[in-house]
Image (tube, grey):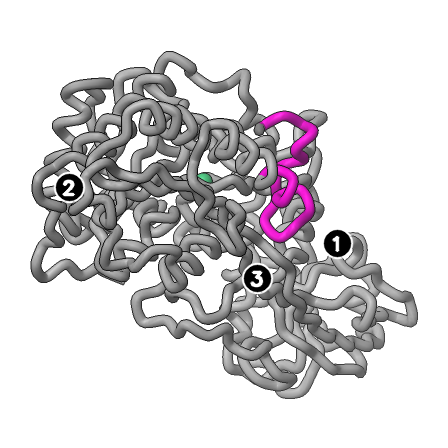
Amino acid sequence: MASPAMRGREGGTIDELRASEWVAERYRRIGLVSMGDDGSYFQWFDITRTRVSVTASRVTIAGQPMMLFSDIIPTAVVPAEASGSVLWIADATDTTADVRGRIVATPMLTPSPASIRANSYTYASRYADGAIVTTLGRFARRGAAAVIMVASASVDTAFAVVASARGRGAYDVDRAIPRAGNGSDRVAPPPALGTGFTPSFVVHSSLRRLLAAGANAEISIRLERFTVPSVNVIGMVRGTDSRLRNEYVLYSSHQDANGVRVTMEGDSVHAGADDNASVTAADLAAARAFVRQPGRRSVLFINHGSEERGLLGSRWHAAHPVVPISQVVAVINGDMIGRNNPDSAALLGSQPPHRNSSDFLAMALRANALTGKFILDTLWDRPSHPEGWYFRSDHLPYARVGVPALMYTTNLHDDYHTPRDTPASIDYPKLLRMAQWLYVTGWLTANAPERPKVDPGFRLER
Ligand SMILES: [Zn+2]
């Protein structure tokens, strides 16, 4: 699944569909009951992608056409229409100039320490994002028609990475569980011209002289929106108890990864071995075990599509479940379970405000005592953790609709979301123990006399 031939399984591409077909074929060989559309293993859904159109947009500076995302990077998915001589502001911290209606150009500021987010992306790209935020902050609500930021030397070196990230645009799924607690279940219309953010751009430092001389610029940015198919792969093992078999334990993974991107150290395929072939492999093992010896309750196995594009598959399935959602008794979601210290792991959803079922947690802890005996790292489940890890995997939409849900993980590492997340980096003995932990949690839950209760008053912090 994490071989180069799978090309990083990016959500909404033919590569994700190839991986989904691979997973479905494993489900068929194992003997899972197909639970998708029209008797198949596939639950199809459309994802909406909105991005800057490189064919319908045009930017020229001093008469020279700029290649979008190569010479100039639009930093947000907003339309723009502006032309005229550039107003050069040599020091962006000087906020006294009247910039209303003008195309402003300015050297990028050094990012403030607070703007360099403490996340797991490379320092160069976090530095560049921080520099963009810090510089743009000086122009907020001052009425500029557009802001062109001239890259500093360090942002110049990260130019291709920033261009690749910003060029992807925004992904969403309509009529699904919102990702944010106060969100809508509908995809918002694309931003209209003249509303929302000030259109902003980054250019190479080599353009500084032209812009400082007050060159003419013409900017016409248009957006494009389209839908592409993505898919959840869903199979089931029927329970043995005639009374309990209409209740379901749900094993959750995602088959997508981050596709083919900027080359790093000679490789461009985001193989996604830990993220999330590791959990897919563990769930296939659990599926084999349940087929050989079914539990009293039924067990659903779902590989969610387009998780990396914003939990799109799980948000879709939680809103359009293949069995009544009230009959799903627990979600065992795993995301990255094969790395880091052999003795430690994390269980997200195990402490307030993320804990939504003390009953289910007790089963998971008992299963750990019977299998991997991992020392559980509780830092990552705290609302104060800078990664916001609890909100970044497929258990979230299920927790939002009131299903007891936990996320099993061995946490982030330096190879996260890079071409270095390969099968060779997996700790296989640890992955086996994690797989056993997931399996035994499901076994205990499938056979418990009572389904786990939802804790009263469960409310996420966002
Ligand atoms: Zn993942």
| Number of residues whose C-alpha sits closer than 10 Å to that of mark 1, classed few (under 14), some (14–19) or many (20 or more) | some
Residue 130 seen from this side: no
In the rendered image of this protein, does residue 243 appear above or below residue 101?
Answer: above
The numbered mark, 1 or 3, whose residue comes first in the sequence reads 3
Left or right of 238 in this view: 20 = right
Q: Position of residue 217 (x, y in %)?
A: 81, 75
> Which residue is labeled 1 in the image?
204
Give the number of the mark in front: 1 or 3. Answer: 3
Question: Which disc, if any, is residue 46?
Answer: none
Residue 13 lies in magenta, yes or no? Answer: yes
Q: Secondary structure at mark 3?
A: strand
Which of the 4 quarters of the picture holds residue 432? Answer: top left
In the rendered image of this protein, does residue 89 appear above or below residue 254?
Answer: below
Q: Position of residue 55 (x, y in %)?
A: 82, 67
Q: Residue placed at 56% from the left, 24% from the top?
A: 422
In the rendered image of this protein, does residue 436 appear above or below residue 189?
Answer: above
The quarter of the image that holds ligand 1 is top left
What residue range appears in magenta?
Answer: 2-19
How many marks overall? 3
> Which of these two is toward me, 196 or 315?
315
> Which residue is labeled 3 in the image?
47
Three-letter code, disc 1: His
Q: Position of residue 295 (x, y in %)?
A: 23, 32
> Which residue is labeled 2 in the image?
360
Q: CA distance from mark 2 to mark 3?
A: 32 Å
Three-letter code, disc 2: Phe
Q: CA distance from mark 1 to mark 3?
A: 33 Å
Mark 1 CB near ligand 1 (8 Å cut):
no
Left or right of 40 in this view: 450 = left
Which of the 4 quarters of the picture holds residue 207? Answer: bottom right
